[in-house]
Amino acid sequence: MKVGLQWALSDAHLPTNQSSAQRQLSVSVSASGQGVQAPLNLCFVLDRSGSMMGMPLQTVKQAANRIVDRLTERDRISIIAFDHKAQVLVPNRLATDIDSIKKQIDSLSAGGGTSIDDGLKAGIEQLAEGKEDHVSQLLLLTDGENEHGDNARALKLANVAIGYNLTVNTLGFGDHWNQDVLEQIADEGGGSLSYIERAEEAISIFGRLFTRMQSVNLTNAYLNVELLEGTRLADLKPVAQVSPETVELTAMQEGNQAMIRIGDLMTDQARVVMLNLYVPQLAEGKTSIARIQVSYDDPALGLTGQTTETLPVNILAQAAYEPETDAAVQQNILALAKYRQTQIAEDKLKAGDRKGAVTMLQSAANTAIQMGDENAATVLQKNATQLQAGKELSERDRKKTRIVSKTQLQ
């Protein structure tokens, strides 16, 4: 298995008479080619608090059992149940006795409060035991606030998971989970945030997330960027991922070197990272403004610290400047704008600036229309209209807004 690495600039040309110019560099990274599929090391961390009683917990158990049925004897499984404290239902082991594992899932009953960080800690401990030569994925599901826990601790634990090369995915069930906390845990843990709006959606959403996990072939990937010819990253929000979901990323910089963690690499969907660059005045002709390379691990072969070839990022400086824009990069710019406009709208609404929130939601809806994301445009415009009419947004409205801001719904 190899890394597919491609780049494109928002405009591949540059005027020679301009002292500085801004360009967006889009970098697409995926696992590609034929290779051995690494086995999964999967951990369910499931909320069984009192609010999950009845249909919610029943559908979650059904969804988890469907996933267990799809595991192979090479895969590993562990299961944590939590209310106000965590319990290890299935310690990390090979998925060889499926009936026994499903019996433990079926034994789950609801009661008690919610301590997300206790569940997360137990899940990370179990997942770490089976991580060698596996793709390690934690799936955390909750329907409520972290009332008996500590949100700051939960975020630190997600960061700990990354240090062990474990990925944390979060699922919010129903309308009363904290979207800020679950999004931050997923972003910090290198995973995805999913919203189970109605109980009957649990099986399909679990299945979609499991399919994504199965497509991971390379892990612990970093994009390494060497900036040349005086090119520099923007000071404010210089790096973001725009696919498969939008996430603000951190660039670790030292001199003209920058290192950006991008995590798991999938075969069916590329990770697309956008870098906001400032390019200095250049002499006429083609110039390399950066060099890029990806380092990664290949768990199927037990290899760590592998690297791709280094690719130069070239730009053409012209005295008679003619723009050469890239349509795919423009789409990525719009995806990032949609996310950031929605974030600003949410911040304004929290601050009591209803008019400002309406304006930004309408801007985000227009951006969604430009990029052909009709689902997002509908959700965002509906919320803007509702606020403009003096109505409040429901918890469901807010959660759908967050989800459509981060991804393009199918």
Image (cartoon, grey):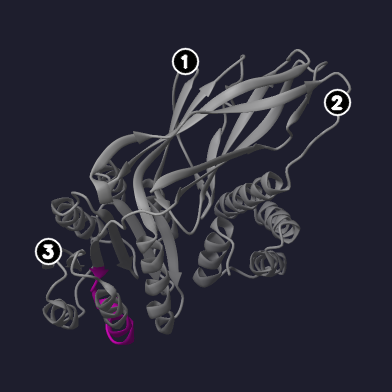
Q: Which of the 4 image quarters holds residue 359?
A: bottom right
Crowd around label 3: few <14 · some 14–19 · many ≥20 (10 Å)? some
In the rendered image, which residue does mark 2 sit on?
A: 321
Q: Residues within 10 Å of mark 2 (few under 14, many from 20)?
A: few
Q: Give whichever of discs 2 and 1 has the lower sequence position.
A: 1
Q: Residue 57 in magenta?
A: yes
What span is colored magenta in the figure?
Answer: 46-59
188, above or below 361, in the image: above
Helix, strand or loop for disc 2: loop
Tell me which label, 3 or 2, sits earlier in the chain.
3
- Determine whether 112 is above or below 180 in the image: below
Secondary structure of the residue carrying numbered label 3:
strand
Q: Which residue is mark 1?
A: 255
Residue 90 location in percent, x, y? 12, 68
Q: Which mark is residue 405?
A: none
Report the mark closest to the observer, 1 or 3: 3
Return the mark for residue 93.
3
How many neighbours does mark 1 have within 10 angstroms: few (below 14), some (14-19), or many (20 or more)?
few
User: Looking at the image, which is closer to me, 166 or 346?
Assistant: 166
